[in-house]
Image (tube, rainbow, N blue to C red):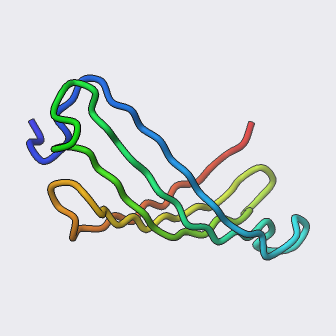
Amino acid sequence: MNKAETPAQTSLVDELAVGRYFTPHDVPFGDLVFYCESNSLVPLDGGASRFTVVSVGPGPRFRIAINCFFLADWDFPVTGNKPDHHTLQVPLLKVF
């Protein structure tokens, strides 16, 4: 029903992030990393060049408890239907 999303049943999705650690593991805000990431989504159902979405953005990550991490990602699309919009994602990660 969302007409703004990529209309595809099958897509190739890839992500790449490069960052640097600033704090050691055993301190408050341990394993602090600032990174830059890129994402792409390429529909394989035809119309790939028209609906391909590529985005880039910065983000931090740090440890908040034993095996729990805070992440944030500010994503800026550089291609696609709406290249001027951005997205902020803030997940909490639990490592098992």
Residue drawn where x is 39% and y is 65% of the image: 88
- Give the number of marks: 0
Determine whether 32 is above or below 95 in the image.
Answer: below
Determine whether 47 is above or below 64 in the image.
Answer: above
Residue drawn where x is 39% and y is 64% of the image: 75
Provide residue 73's location: percent of width, then percent of height: 48, 64
Residue drawn where x is 55% and y is 68% of the image: 59
Q: Residue furthest front?
A: 49
Provide residue 46's location: percent of width, then percent of height: 18, 27
Determine whether 36 is above or below 93 in the image.
Answer: below
Provide residue 27's location: percent of width, then percent of height: 87, 73
Could you tell whether 68 is left or right of 7 in the image? right
Provide residue 3's location: percent of width, then percent of height: 8, 42
Could you tell whether 1 is left or right of 79 in the image? left
80, 29: nearer the viewer: 80
16, 4: nearer the viewer: 16
Could you tell whether 71 is left or right of 45 in the image? right
Q: Residue furthest right?
A: 26
**Quadrant in the picture for the C terminus:** top right
Q: Quadrant of residue 78?
A: bottom left
Residue drawn where x is 68% and y is 57% of the image: 69
**Quadrant in the picture for the N terminus:** top left
